Image (cartoon, rainbow, N blue to C red):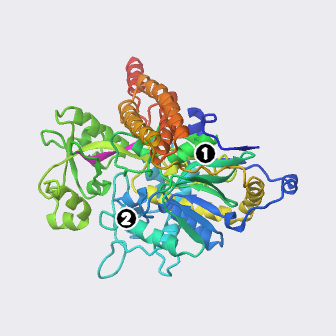
Amino acid sequence: MLRVLSKPVGRTTVAAASRWSKLTPLLPSVTTTARNIFSSSLPEESNRLIVIGSGVAGCSAALVAAEHGLSVTLLTAGSNIVDNNSNWAQGGIIYENTDPEIGDSAQALERDIHVAGAGLCDSSAVEKLAAEGPNRVRQLLLDPSGTFANVPFDADPVTGKLSVCLEASHSAARILYYADSSGAVITEHITAAAVRHPNINVMRESVVTDLCVADGTCVGVQRMDTVTGGIVPMMAGKGVVLASGGLGSIYEHTTNPPGFNALGSSVALATRIGAQTADLEYVQFHPTSLYIPGEARFLLTEALRGEGAILRDKDGRAFAKDFHPDGELAPRDVVARGVFAEAKNNPNGHVYLDVSHLDATFLKSRFPTINKHLSARGIDMTSDFMPVVPASHYTCGGVSSDLHGRTTVPGLYVAGEAARTGLHGGNRLASTSLLEGLVWGASVADFVASEEGQEVSHSLHTLAGKNINAWPEHQSKGVNPEAMQNSEAASTLLSQLRRTMWDNVGVERTSDSTAFAAETLKEMQEEAEELFQRTPTTATVAVRDAACAGEAVATAANLNKTSAGAHYVVDAIEKDEILSAAS
């Protein structure tokens, strides 16, 4: 039995999503009978691991798998392999602080993650990141051999010791950085390593429209060539890795880049084949995105507040400690709600971030990208207040994953922002995202290459070989009036979808607003699916994925009546306050 599903199959309840962390057993055993029934005719070039996404998670999975001797096909949506969300990260990546006077440790990092995550993190995932993180950074990002990446992070010019900085909710300075463009330099080096590896085939301008399933197992993908518009099946005898990012761009205001990077493609692809998702209601909003009317939001990194930036209201008063004793260094969800609340009191709809009290020379050298962006808009960060508002930033939940990146569908793996590993709980700690992608991406590859992983691959190889001709190719009709009309309709629908998410499942939400969003997104998803089925184009693919992901987020938010972390339910808070007062 084989499937290419285009409608959602089942949905995880919030109770299951909030508690579900370890998949035991995750994958069904491969029986001897199943091996003997099918004869494999899978071509050697299809006996590969397909990785969807070229960010830190995707490249880590691809590189480690390639070093294990596996053949890897890396799919990326853009014409440039660095066109991914990792490239946009400003702050840095968690490493370690070796200064004995600081007293940093893996246990200290674990505590910080749990506090930021509103008590909803899975301990096993937190322990994994804290224990494995430094070694994965050394292996994949500080490798002088040339096999992986050797990123030139900021360091002491005399001693060469790596510099580390402090960010919000961290108890110690432990974050490696490269000025304010850490993601860009990490992406530059890790993608270059992937491109030059002989076991990795990079396919650009490739969007996956659906996953191919045979007998409940993921055996490949349907790949759209964004230049020609044609769709062809690609078999994956070693499995498929979802590493195509989160869903922040399904909101009207976001720090995420344009394109396919953050439209929820991984969640949508997984949902359409019945894979479990979890914690989708916990969408993190960054407190400080630059507010320029008529422009897309621009991230002002957490590191600014780590260096001493102050949040000020319309009258210039520092207000952050009104909401939390740690002020600007409180968890992101708390700071975001504080900014959101104070912005309502300003007729201009924003608050201010102030670094004018810091040394001007230091600011320009530490934050050159931000300084350049602000200067082009007539803002001098060394003397002017910067107007800021919250914007959707990061997906704490995602496709459910165990500690090896395995999902609930055999043959399908997930890493990075696409995954719900349990690490983030209700709110992500600053600079954990790149490290999570690194750690889980590498873990997926290690599992696929392991003895147990090879058992899974044997089943995949057999099923893919048996069904290799089951998925027809779709030839594009080229530019035609119907395709143009449907693409325009898709773009309009996507704009409506983003506004619906922002207005109803945003920084603050209510039971009524999330119910409205869930029903509206269900209707939008049906319309988006119809547009895609009529004319598969990049625009209809985008809105189809966004609508599927959006409905999943809205439904999860509506089902979860407990306000915690980034899921701030106003009526739940008001009810708790009434009950507390009554007692």
Marker disc for residue 21: 1
Marker disc for residue 184: 2
Vertical comparison of 209 with 36: above or below: above
Which residue corresponds to the image point at 37% horizontal and 58% vertical from the top-left? 88
Residue 61 shown in magenta = no
What predominant SS class does the magenta segment belong to? strand
Q: Which residues are magenta?
A: 284-291
Of residues 215 and 4, which is closer to you in this image? Answer: 4
Q: Quadrant of residue 577?
A: top left
| 2 or 1: mark nearer the eye | 2
How dense is the environment of label 2, judged by Cα within 10 Å: few (below 14), some, or many (20 and up)? some
Which residue corresponds to the image point at 22% horizontal and 53% vertical from the top-left? 309
Q: Residue furthest top?
A: 582
Residue 290 shown in magenta = yes
Looking at the rendered structure, the secondary structure element under dot 2 is helix
Q: Amino acid at mark 1?
A: Ser
Which residue corresponds to the image point at 41% horizontal and 25% vertical from the top-left? 513
Vertical comparison of 372 with 517: above or below: below
Quadrant of the frame with the C terminus: top left
On screen, residue 327 versus residue 63, left or right, reads left
Q: Position of residue 72 (x, y in %)?
A: 61, 66
On screen, residue 296 versus residue 208, left or right, reads left
